[in-house]
């Protein structure tokens, strides 16, 4: 207790030097919480959006389906029958049929994926209910990125060519009935959504699907030739991207933390050098060398306690504001390949705050301890005389 | 009076219908004229893009419809690339990687060197009469030549184009124009066959222009030079070993 009292008295007594160190360390602490909170917020938003718009509660893939091999689509489809059909009828699964196609907007040629979705499905957030058929028109839904890339807008007709199950060419005009806005690029880029029964009929794949998206009530695993992929597997890419981002962020705030810790280290070295008489007096009064080391280490690490208090004073309102207002994201970041909204809402979990507090306290304690080891080698008589050792 | 006119027109139409030659017979004659034991030719393939054009020159040796060997001579980036088609299989040798790759499955649907032709277009060696029902639609002029328009409709499922139309010159038994349609009736490609020459007793088009009708651009022009039929071709040419030579 004496050590803590002494440490804080000495720190406050050091005045501006202490407050400079504390300010830099508190800044590092707030930045750590902010940056990790932002990445956690992004992760959560990307995870939720991708789940809502694309992966649902998992997917059942045809055994030949590989999302990274567009050429597999010719063979990766099978009839939706038996158990699977019952689950589809019960609203636990929704089938999707995917085929390669080419569109010709304004005479240009673009390769796309033509996807069939049940207009009545409720599992995905995709506005499939808008795919209402009019006589002689094939309705199509596209995302804002696809609309931008192909220079298409609501009401436009786009000539599309594809091959049926036997490889025979077919081509029709599709009418863009709506342009949806989703943060998830993977259901938007180079994709056109049309009613499932229409795509099944056009490709000769009656009642067939490439994959089925599971709803929240789906509890079964794989079924016959349909392999179940859970949402953890399907969202692994997002997790990996966030992990990489966190790695990069660690370098930035690590540098900031290193500067603050260097200042504490420097302060410790200077104070041990300048306060040799004081150290000698402590020992002469009966303290062991280790007790003196303890006083100086606590003094150094107390910087971190003050930094956390100071950081909380200005950090809490600032981080609260950013949580409420969100952080606007530049448009260019949309091409990163991960779902990202126009504003990211940071999420500050208890785990994040506690781990940041511990990081600051432990690292400040370590850098405070190293210079004090010199005290153990000091001769008390020389220290009392103030002789340089 | 009205009845008489109607009957006269009807008879005229029927008579015209009867006077049109059978589409399948026309196709067989075209096949007889154009097929040979083998052929050797050099070609210039000019791909007209939206902004620029590029020309590839190649030497091809083929035997019937099942064996073909092509070596690209220019430009420098494609020089030394070789393609071998053997009994429904296709291999490509690339000198830059010194590797032989087999083109199969969906890769056959890719364009050849960025042209309007796909590998599949050169791979389908079935006779038209085997996969299409032919019907002569009527007569039309292509340039200054009279032609019969023959409509082909697929009679098997695994064809790329459900419907085709051919404009056949009945004197020389050479198609002068082809149109390839999707199942919906949408015109997809137009092929023009020009510069018909009599080579070793048979009429043969030496320039073929392929145009993808859905995209902009002026298509791909394929010009054959130094065309020879029934020449001695060593057997080793149609082996995989010849690709690396």
Image (cartoon, coloured by chain):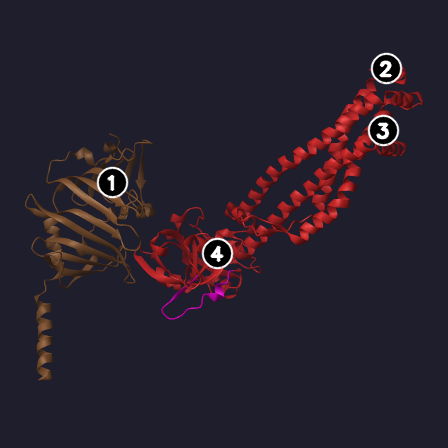
Chain colours: A red, B brown
Mark 4, other Cα within 10 Å: few <14 / some 14–19 / many ≥20: many
Q: Are marks 1 and 2 in contact (CB under 8 Å)?
A: no
| C-alpha distance separating marks 2 and 4 | 75 Å
Callouts 2 and 3 on one subunit: yes
Q: Is residue B207 above or below residue A217?
A: above
Say which chain tag 3 marks.
A
User: Mark 1: which secondary structure?
Assistant: strand
Q: Which mark is first along the chain, 3 or 2?
A: 3
Mark 2, other Cα within 10 Å: few <14 / some 14–19 / many ≥20: few
Tell me residue B190's x, y (percent): 23, 54
Q: Which residue was labeled with disc 1?
A: B55
Residue A127, magenta (yes or no): yes
User: Mark 3: which secondary structure?
Assistant: helix
Our reading of the magenta stretch's main secondary structure is loop
Tell me residue A82's x, y (percent): 46, 62
Callouts 1 and 2 on one subunit: no
Q: Which mark is first along the chain, 4 or 3?
A: 4
Q: Which residue was labeled with disc 2?
A: A387
Q: Which residue was labeled with disc 3?
A: A295
Label disc, if present, on residue A144 of the rendered structure: 4
| C-alpha distance separating marks 1 and 2 | 90 Å
Residue A125, magenta (yes or no): no
Quadrant in the picture for residue A250: top right
Q: Which residues are magenta?
A: A126-140
Q: Residue at x 89, y 23 (%)?
A: A278
Q: Is residue B126 above or below residue A11?
A: below
| C-alpha distance separating marks 2 and 3 | 21 Å
Q: Which mark is first along the chain, 4 or 2?
A: 4
Tell me residue B225's x, y (percent): 15, 40
């Amino acid at each position: 207790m004496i050590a803590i009292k002494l440490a804080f008295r000495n720190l406050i007594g050091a005045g501006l030097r202490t407050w400079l160190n504390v300010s830099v360390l508190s800044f590092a602490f707030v930045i750590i919480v902010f940056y990790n909170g932002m990445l956690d917020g992004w992760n959560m938003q990307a995870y939720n959006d991708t789940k809502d718009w694309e992966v649902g509660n998992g997917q059942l893939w045809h055994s030949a389906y590989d999302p990274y091999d567009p050429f597999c689509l010719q063979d990766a489809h099978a009839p939706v029958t038996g158990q699977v059909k019952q689950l589809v009828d019960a609203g636990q699964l929704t089938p999707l049929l995917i085929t390669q196609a080419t569109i010709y907007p304004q005479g240009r040629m673009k390769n796309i994926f033509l996807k069939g979705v049940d207009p009545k499905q409720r599992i995905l957030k995709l506005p499939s209910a808008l795919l209402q058929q009019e006589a002689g028109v094939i309705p199509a839904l596209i995302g804002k990125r696809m609309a931008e890339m192909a220079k298409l807008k609501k009401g436009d007709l786009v000539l599309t060519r594809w091959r049926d199950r036997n490889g025979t060419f077919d081509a029709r005009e599709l009418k863009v009935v709506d342009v949806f806005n989703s943060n998830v690029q993977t259901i938007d880029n180079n994709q056109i959504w049309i009613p499932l029964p229409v795509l099944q009929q056009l490709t000769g794949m009656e009642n067939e699907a490439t994959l089925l998206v599971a709803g929240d009530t789906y509890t079964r695993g794989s079924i016959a030739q349909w392999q179940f992929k859970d949402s953890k597997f399907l969202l692994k890419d997002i997790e990996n991207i966030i992990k990489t981002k966190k790695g990069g962020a660690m370098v930035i705030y690590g540098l900031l933390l290193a500067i603050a810790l260097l200042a504490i280290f420097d302060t410790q070295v200077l104070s041990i050098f300048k306060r040799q008489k004081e150290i000698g007096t402590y020992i002469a009064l009966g303290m062991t060398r280790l007790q003196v080391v303890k006083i100086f280490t606590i003094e150094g690490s107390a910087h971190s306690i003050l930094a956390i208090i100071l950081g909380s004073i200005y950090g809490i309102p600032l981080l609260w504001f950013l949580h409420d207002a969100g952080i606007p994201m530049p448009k260019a970041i949309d091409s990163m390949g991960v779902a990202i909204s126009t504003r990211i809402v940071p999420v500050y979990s208890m785990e994040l705050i506690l781990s940041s507090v511990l990081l600051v306290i432990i690292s400040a304690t370590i850098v405070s301890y190293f210079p004090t080891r010199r005290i153990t080698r000091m001769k008390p008589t020389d220290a009392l005389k103030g002789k340089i050792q | 009076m009205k009845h008489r006119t109607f009957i006269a027109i009807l008879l005229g139409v029927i008579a015209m219908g009867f006077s049109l030659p059978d589409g399948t017979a026309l196709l067989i004659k075209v096949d007889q004229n154009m097929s040979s034991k083998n052929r050797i030719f050099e070609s210039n393939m000019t791909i007209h893009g939206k902004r620029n054009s590029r020309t590839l020159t190649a030497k091809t040796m083929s035997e019937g419809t099942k064996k073909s060997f092509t070596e690209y001579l220019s430009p420098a980036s494609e020089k030394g690339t070789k393609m071998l088609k053997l009994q429904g299989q296709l291999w490509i040798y690339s000198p830059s990687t010194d590797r032989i790759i087999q083109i199969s499955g969906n890769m056959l649907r890719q364009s050849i060197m960025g042209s309007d032709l796909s590998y599949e277009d050169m791979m389908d060696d079935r006779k038209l009469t085997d996969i299409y029902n032919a019907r002569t639609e009527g007569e039309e002029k292509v340039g200054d030549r009279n032609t019969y328009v023959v409509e082909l409709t697929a009679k098997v499922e695994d064809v790329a184009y459900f419907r085709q139309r051919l404009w056949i010159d009945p004197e020389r038994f050479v198609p002068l124009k082809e149109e390839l349609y999707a199942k919906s009736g949408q015109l997809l490609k137009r092929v023009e066959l020009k510069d018909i020459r009599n080579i070793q007793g048979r009429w043969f088009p030496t320039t073929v222009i392929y145009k993808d009708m859905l995209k902009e651009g002026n298509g791909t022009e394929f010009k054959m030079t130094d065309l020879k039929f029934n020449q001695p071709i060593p057997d080793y040419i149609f082996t995989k070993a010849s690709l690396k030579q």
